[in-house]
Image: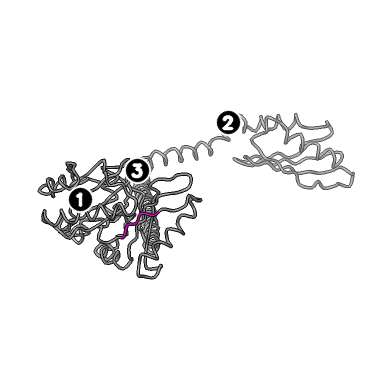
Amino acid sequence: MANLNEAASLLTTGDDLVLSLPISAVIAQRLRLPTIDPSEYEGMVRLQVEKAFPYPPEDVTSAFEVIEKSENESVISSVAVHNARLNELAGPLINRGFIPRQVTVYAAQRAASHAATTRALMIYREGEKLVSAISENGKLSLTRTLDANEEEGLQRDLPQLALSAELQGIDTSFPKVLLGEECLQLRDTIERVFAQRPDLMAPEAPPVPVKLDLLPDTWRRQRAALVSRGEWRRRLFWAGGIYAAIFVLFLLYLVMVRFQVGHLQKAIKRDAPRVDFIKQAEANWKTLSPAIDPHYYPIEVLLHLFESLPNPDVRITVYEQSARNISVQGEAPSAALAYQFAEAVKKNSGLRDFTFNLQTPRILPNDHAQFRLEGKTK
């Protein structure tokens, strides 16, 4: 891939992005600090970074890792980048709305991949430049951009690199010397300088994860906002999907209901003649029931009426019966006996198909009570 512009054009929303910086964009320092509470390292490292950078502290992002720690002294790997330089390098990503999850250094990833537990010297190309990096236990101690690309210049620069490392307290008897595959023609030159044949180092795909993170706070906040926005977008998408599914189910329900209603209407229309026949037959039976049902026979009704007389002195004087109504007139020695007669008629099981209502008895001159009991079929 030619450049970051081309790589950015291939990214899609939601891609997990780690940006690896070249050595030329950062300053790596090897610091010796007193062994203190780990929470206090950040302030001390930040103070050393401010001394090394000619920029205001707020314009610089730094990170550190502990290389080794003893009882009294700790060796720290400190890496810092100028935010303006970082924004320039990451412009193709930021302009497209892609915020990396992590910003690290490619040399640190190569060190963690090839020399995670030892001291090593790495020489490889980053673009057109030849660079070198010294790592200890997979953490960067010293980085340089080598000016020379030819063998003679390299024989001059590499001893100077070793001298700078020794001045910082780095042992230059490297257990590992690593050379990028793209620099194969320099293998013999490096072997002559360090009296050790370098191992070839292939590009990592992908490099191993590292803890070193130079992500600026502003980017971190922007990324958190993008992640939150993406989460809300995802929730809205799922909510819309659920709503659409409910709407589709509702439409299917309506279609099913319309189908069932149509089916029922057809069944009703088909059965309408039979229903009309049954209704007509029921009406005819109701009309004929007084004539054919023994419960409506006048003699049966009279029998039950006489069974309900509370006293032989209570007499029925008039009896009238139509298809649906019964009218009974009579005379009782007292109004109380008339009411007893009415209650007995209502309780008579043979007259359960009728509903009876007693009108207020009329008192005759001889103190007898004349009553009228009306009955209707239920």
Q: Residue at x 89, y 47 (%)?
A: 365
Report the side of 32 relative to 283 (left or right). Answer: left
Nearer to us: label 2 or label 1 = 1
Position in image of residue 102 (x %, y %): 33, 54
Q: Earlier in the sequence, mark 2 or mark 1?
A: 1
Residue that mark 3 sits on: 263
Position in image of residue 142 (x %, y %): 30, 54
Report the side of 151 relative to 60 (left or right). Answer: left
The stretch of residues the image draws in magenta is: 27-31
Report the side of 294 relative to 200 (left or right). Answer: right
Residue that mark 1 sits on: 123
Q: Which mark is residue 293?
A: 2
* In contact (CB < 8 Å): disc 2 and disc 1: no
* In contact (CB < 8 Å): disc 1 and disc 3: no
Split into 4 quadrants, where in the image is the N terminus? Answer: bottom left
Q: Is the residue marked by circle 3 packed among few (<14), some (14-19), or many (20+) residues within 10 Å? A: few
Amino acid at the residue labelled 2: Asp
- The magenta stretch spans residue 96: no
Badge 1 marks a residue whose secondary structure is strand
Split into 4 quadrants, where in the image is the C terminus? Answer: top right
Amino acid at the residue labelled 1: Ile
Badge 3 marks a residue whose secondary structure is helix
Count the labels in the image.
3
Seen as rendered, the residue at the extreme right is: 366
Q: Residue at x 36, y 64 (%)?
A: 52
Q: Earlier in the sequence, mark 1 or mark 3?
A: 1
Nearer to us: label 3 or label 2 = 3
